[in-house]
Image (tube, rainbow, N blue to C red):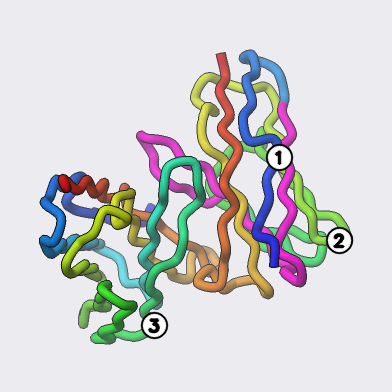
Amino acid sequence: GQQLNQSPQSMFIQEGEDVSMNCTSSSIFNTWLWYKQDPGEGPVLLIALYKAGELTSNGRLTAQFGITRKDSFLNISASIPSDVGIYFCAGQSLIQGAQKLVFGQGTRLTINP
Amino acid sequence: KAGVTQTPRYLIKTRGQQVTLSCSPISGHRSVSWYQQTPGQGLQFLFEYFSETQRNKGNFPGRFSGRQFSNSRSEMNVSTLELGDSALYLCASSPTPGKPYEQYFGPGTRLTVT
């Protein structure tokens, strides 16, 4: 089946540093989504990307939909303690006649104050 | 507006038993999807319901089933539990089906099978 390779698996950074993570796949997706999940909570949508090459920002977060439609990255600038959590990418495509989401394995972000 | 609620939040069951999890979507949302989250497999789509009908299904065995009621509330059932069914089960609701980017997730039900 379709798989997303998300990297890095974990990051340990200092407060104030910039963060970059990405997802790649051998499959084409028509939408890329980035989520953040805090402990004990469900994922929360951060950014949605709908077309190849699209670059979208949400505050200190910026994400891009790769030109090949097989990859996406998420950048976080000037990290703060509340950025701690697990970040997931997800690709949406038509599978067996229905729109389905495939998720990456997540990037766990830890920030040292 | 209240978010997606899931009950119970935590559950411990024994192998071979069955379990039913409940999800109440955001008011006005008529589509409900279920996901399984495990450390090994990550987040995987189980199924999606809209207007009391299953519209979409992931690659899970028939032991996993669900239903949706006329008020859009949904339940999922797992029969003959196996140790590997231990996971966080997430429910997500959206106004209309087929648009995962419009989904809001609940906090999940943590199921432990012993």
Mark 1 in CB contact with mark 3 (< 8 angstroms): no
Task: Tell me where the magenta segment starts and ends, as one range.
Answer: B19-45
Which residue was labeled with disc 3? Answer: A50
Which residue was labeled with disc 2? Answer: B71
Disc 3 from disc 2: Cα separation: 31 Å
Q: Is residue A111 above or below residue A101?
A: above
Q: Callout 2 environment at 10 Å: few (<14), some (14 to 19), or many (20+)?
A: some
Disc 2 from disc 1: Cα separation: 16 Å
* Chain containing mark 3: A
Q: Could you tell me how many numbered marks the image carries? A: 3
Prevailing secondary structure of the magenta residues: strand
Q: Callout 3 environment at 10 Å: few (<14), some (14 to 19), or many (20+)?
A: some
Q: Say whether residue B46 is visible.
A: no
Which of the pair A49/B4 is nearer the observer? B4
Residue type for callout 3: Tyr
**Residue A85 at x, y = what percent?**
33, 49
Residue type for callout 1: Thr
* Chain containing mark 2: B
**Residue A68 at x, y = what percent?**
21, 78
